[in-house]
Amino acid sequence: MRKQVLKLQRKMRELGIDVYVVSDIDEHLSEYVSDHFHALEEYSGFTGGDGKLVVTAGSSDADTGKDFEGLAALWTDGRYFTQAENQLEGSGIELMRMGEPETPLMNDWIFEQLPEGGTLGFDGSCTPFKEGTVLADKVRAKGVRCVYERDLCGDLWEDRPAQKVTPCWILKEKYTGKSAADKIADLKAVMEKAGADAHILTTVDDIAWLLNLRADDVPNNPVFMAYLMIMPDGQVRLYTEEGHLTDEVSVYLKGFCVQVFPYHQIYEDVKQLEAVSKGSGDVAVLLDKKRCNYTIVSSIPAGIRIIDRINPEAEAKACKNETERANIRIAQHKDSVALVKFMHWFKTEGLKMERLTEWTAAEKLHSFRAEQPGFFDESFGTISAYGANAAMAHYAPSPDPALDTPIEPHGLYLVDSGGQYPEGTTDVTRTWSCGPITPEERLGYTLTVIANLRLGDARFLEGTSGLVLDYAAREPFWRRGMNYNHGTGHGVGHVLNVHEAPVGIRYKIADIEGAWPLMEGMYLSDEPGSYVAGSYGVRIENLVLVTLDYVNEYGRFMKFETVNFCPVDRTCLDISLMEERDIRLLNLYHKRVYEELAGDLTPEERTWLKAMCEPIVREE
């Protein structure tokens, strides 16, 4: 058994814990987490993006002092089966392939391993409230005690990376369009309308947006680790590490009466909510249980009424104001220049290199972005994928030369990437040929382009759900009995997270947010794709703003404004599959691409781009 697991099992026996669950989540349930929270990797060796490790304590013989190992099993989904098989080999940890008929559900397996009246352990601060509640309810039938207020893995983790604490910087009003003081005033008005006396906020992107502060605590997301609570008396409390507070930021926060407290003091202050209430006997706190960890919600006194709803900050920040939209266009212009320069280099120089690889291509793209004024980070790790690797939607290239895939002079190359600028966050995907492609690749490519163009051309009444609009993208695939197994669009933050709730475009309702109404100012992606496992992958992604088209007696009609510019590789298209409207839409887009970018390119790049953007004329 892996030594870290054995150490954990010994501690579990010492503390009387029968089963312990290890996660890879931070206290704020962030999509991306710092190395400090990679407990799953430390204890299992598995580095995939989603998984849970469950460990049983085993036993000890009091007479001989001999220990008997317990069990260890890791649950993950089909995206990571091959990776998990390789990384768990020889560890003594059993791989549980989620979704396969013979694989037990994790909570069922835990229930079977727990003795009557036993003890289950997990770190409640790094467990979603709903997940912890479902698990606790499941094991209650055996009279099991849940221990969740101790980070057992953290206690035992030797040389654990320190939690990153970076200085905050103020995102000025010329970028945000609204002061933090005004945002807080709006929030308090929403609280009053909802009947809330207090508000607990644990999501770091919402806190960064509310306070107009940014930092570098989490990879690719310019946020800082913090909690925020508005008390019944109206006091605004920010819970964070002192290292985030420069002199300028401290003065700035005092300017609109935000009081700063130690990072983890919130856990005690939540328990005291009733004591500091207005004494009305019916104190209500507004929070989003879905986005709170188990310990926070469980610490709220029984006498406090919880108003469980989406964070008002998440709703407000989803609709970008006019200033934010203007800045987003600036950021997208810079990013589009970088991507087009990279595409030109790839096509004219990169493919002639003795050894062009996925990693070296990604590094080259980064260098072009780094040349753009204000660029300070990628918005996520670049997906640079050649051939069959592009069929994996969450693929990551390897910097290890032995594992780095070479790009050959045939087939398709997919690059999904984005940048962070003071003006905004970007995300764009393009796929293009490296040489000859197969008829199957050409079909998938053409259908993806058609789907992207048709969704981008949609007209709809304000408030229409992304569930309705998803059909515009999927219809070309469904008509041929094809599909792609990911959402068509996700919300994007403003100098924040590249994936931002609640807006989205998809055909399945995972929760109420799957049907969130699209409103003016929302910023989201249009990214259909076509994938054949073991063969190829295609994705074309643009970012769009929801903008007003016109108003009539039926209401406010919206359209999408595409804000990023990079040509589609026309050499990959089967024109016979495209209707006249598809050709017209592509020609119009290419006209905009050239007009937007030509002035920022070298003469050689400009000539190349003009050829790439020449109108398509269907031969009679």
Image: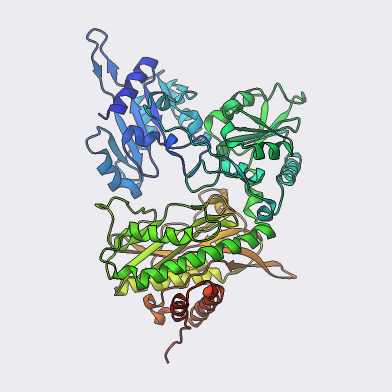
Q: Quadrant of the C terminus?
A: bottom left
Residue found at the far bottom of this picture? 620
Report the number of discs. Answer: 0
Task: Using the rendered image of the protein, determine whether residue 382 is visible from the camera's viewpoint.
Answer: yes
The front one of 420 and 55 is 420
Q: Is residue 153 above or below residue 506?
A: above
Q: Residue, x 38% and y 79% (percent of image)? A: 574
Q: Residue, x 72% and y 29% (percent of image)? A: 283
Query: Along the horizontal axis of the image, is 366 left or right of 559?
Result: left
Query: Along the horizontal axis of the image, is 143 left or right of 195?
Result: left
Question: In the picture, residue 595 is in which quadrant?
Answer: bottom right
The front one of 519 and 180 is 180
Query: Along the horizontal axis of the image, is 600 left or right of 407?
Result: right
Q: Position of residue 365 (x, y in %)?
A: 42, 61
Q: Position of residue 607 (x, y in %)?
A: 45, 80
Query: Along the horizontal axis of the image, is 605 left or right of 293?
Result: left
Q: Is residue 408 above or below residue 250?
A: below
The front one of 614 and 453 is 614
Q: Is residue 230 above or below residue 450?
A: above
Q: Is residue 225 above or below residue 457?
A: above
The front one of 429 and 73 is 429
Question: In the picture, residue 101 is in which quadrant?
Answer: top left
Q: Position of residue 295 (x, y in %)?
A: 54, 28
Q: Position of residue 191 (x, y in %)?
A: 73, 40
